[in-house]
Every structure is written in structure tokens, then in C-alpha cells.
Image (cartoon, rainbow, N blue to C red):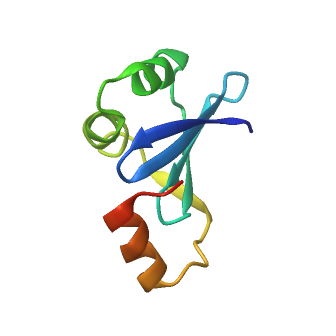
């Protein structure tokens, strides 16, 4: 699934497959989660939101059960560095 870059704190990218109604969210630590049953409108609102991280917490994370697809292989020191200085 192709994902769009997000500059949203803990979220780095989001993707959506309309046929299967699945949304993928990549976190700044490298973890990727899948959310089944998401609507195209929900994905559009997430990517258009002025604060995608807040929208995600309020509308996606609370209403859908995410399934982890990938686990980060970065160290906690690398995570702390990215959180402090941002990830390019």
C-alpha cells in the first residue's frame, strides 16, 4: 500500500486501500499499524487535518483496533533522537 508522508509528531505516513477499506499508519518509531473498516472519508479527514496526530488519537485510535504489521528495529536511543530533533 502506498502511504502519504505526514509531518505530525508521532505519525510519519498514512495509506488507504479503498477496495479493502484498510488504513495503514506508520509511527515515528517505525511501527506500522493496520486499521480495518476505515472509511475513505476518515482517511481524507486524517490527511487533511491541521493536526493529524490529534485527529488520529481522537477518531482512529479510540474507535478502531489496530493490528501491528511491522515492528521497529530502531534502538530507543534512536527513537529519542528522532523525537527530539525530528525525523527527516
Q: How many marks?
A: 0
Q: Position of residue 63 (x, y in %)?
A: 33, 39
- Residue located at (47% from left, 15% from top): 41
- Residue located at (37% from left, 63% from top): 85
Q: Position of residue 13 (x, y in %)?
A: 55, 42
Quadrant containing the C terminus in the rendered view: bottom right
Q: Position of residue 14 (x, y in %)?
A: 55, 38
Residue 29's place in the image compared with 61, above or below, is below
> Which of 31/59 is in front?
31
Left/right placement of residue 77 relative to residue 15 reads: left
- Residue located at (25% from left, 37% from top): 58
Left/right placement of residue 3 relative to residue 63 reads: right
Left/right placement of residue 4 relative to residue 85 reads: right
The picture quadrant where one finds residue 76 is bottom left
Quadrant containing the N terminus in the rendered view: top right
Q: Position of residue 18 (x, y in %)?
A: 67, 22
> Which of 25/82 is in front?
82
The picture quadrant where one finds residue 31 is bottom right
Amino acid at each position: 500500500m502506498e502511504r502519504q508522508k505526514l509531518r505530525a509528531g508521532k505519525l510519519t505516513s498514512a495509506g488507504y486501500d479503498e477496495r479493502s477499506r484498510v488504513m495503514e499508519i506508520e509511527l515515528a518509531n517505525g511501527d506500522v499499524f493496520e486499521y480495518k473498516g476505515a472509511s475513505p472519508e476518515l482517511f481524507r479527514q486524517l490527511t487533511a487535518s491541521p493536526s493529524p496526530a490529534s485527529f488520529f488519537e481522537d477518531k482512529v485510535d479510540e474507535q478502531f483496533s489496530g493490528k501491528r504489521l511491522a515492528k521497529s528495529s530502531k534502538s530507543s536511543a534512536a527513537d529519542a533522537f528522532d523525537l527530539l530533533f525530528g525525523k527527516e
